[in-house]
Image: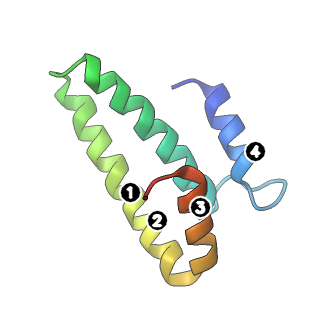
């Protein structure tokens, strides 16, 4: 994953200027990494280590999404819509 992707995603989803760790940013960065790794696994089907990492990232994102839904439902809905995670 390139650093340029991460920086642009952080810029897009940050709540304030120095925000690098809010749920929104973490979820957005994880989503981009998951998309990248999914493409990698389509080509390299036998890469079990990357598959395990993908599963861990998906679980981590799920935990963060659950937390955001519990604490701030409007932000949760907006983030889902913007990242098109769910239909």
Residue 11 horizontal side relative to residue 59, left or right: right
Residue 10, image x and y in percent? 69, 45
Could you tell me how far apart the alpha carbons at marks 3 and 4 are, in whole angstroms?
14 Å
Q: Give the secondary structure at mark 1.
A: helix
Tell me if label 3 and label 4 are in contact, CB under 8 Å: no
Could you tell me how far apart the alpha carbons at marks 1 and 2 are, in whole angstroms?
6 Å
Residue at 53% x, 61% y: name it: 80
Question: Which residue carries the number 1 mark?
Answer: 60
First in sequence: mark 3 vs mark 2: 2
Question: Which residue carries the number 3 mark?
Answer: 79
Q: Residue furthest bottom?
A: 71
Q: Give the secondary structure at mark 4.
A: helix
The quarter of the picture where residue 81 lies is bottom right
The answer to which of 54 and 86 lies nearer the viewer is 86
Question: Which residue carries the number 4 mark?
Answer: 11
Tell me if label 1 and label 3 are in contact, CB under 8 Å: no
Residue at 56% x, 70% y: name it: 76
Tell me if label 3 and label 2 are in contact, CB under 8 Å: no
Residue 52, image x and y in percent? 23, 39
Crowding around mark 3 (Cα neighbors within 10 Å: few <14, some 14 to 19, many 20+) is: many
Residue at 80% x, 54% y: name it: 18
Question: Which residue carries the number 2 mark?
Answer: 64
Query: What is the basis of the colouring in this image?
Result: rainbow
Could you tell me how far apart the alpha carbons at marks 4 and 1 are, in whole angstroms?
21 Å
Tell me if label 1 and label 2 are in contact, CB under 8 Å: yes
């Amino acid at each position: 994953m390139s650093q340029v992707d991460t920086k642009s995603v952080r810029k897009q989803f940050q709540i304030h200027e120095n925000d690098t760790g809010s749920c929104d940013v973490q979820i957005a960065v994880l989503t981009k990494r998951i998309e990248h790794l999914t493409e990698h696994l389509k080509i390299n089907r036998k890469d079990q280590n990357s598959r395990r990492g993908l599963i861990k990232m998906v679980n981590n994102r799920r935990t963060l999404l659950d937390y955001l839904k519990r604490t701030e439902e409007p932000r949760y809905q907006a983030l889902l819509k913007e990242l098109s995670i769910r239909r």
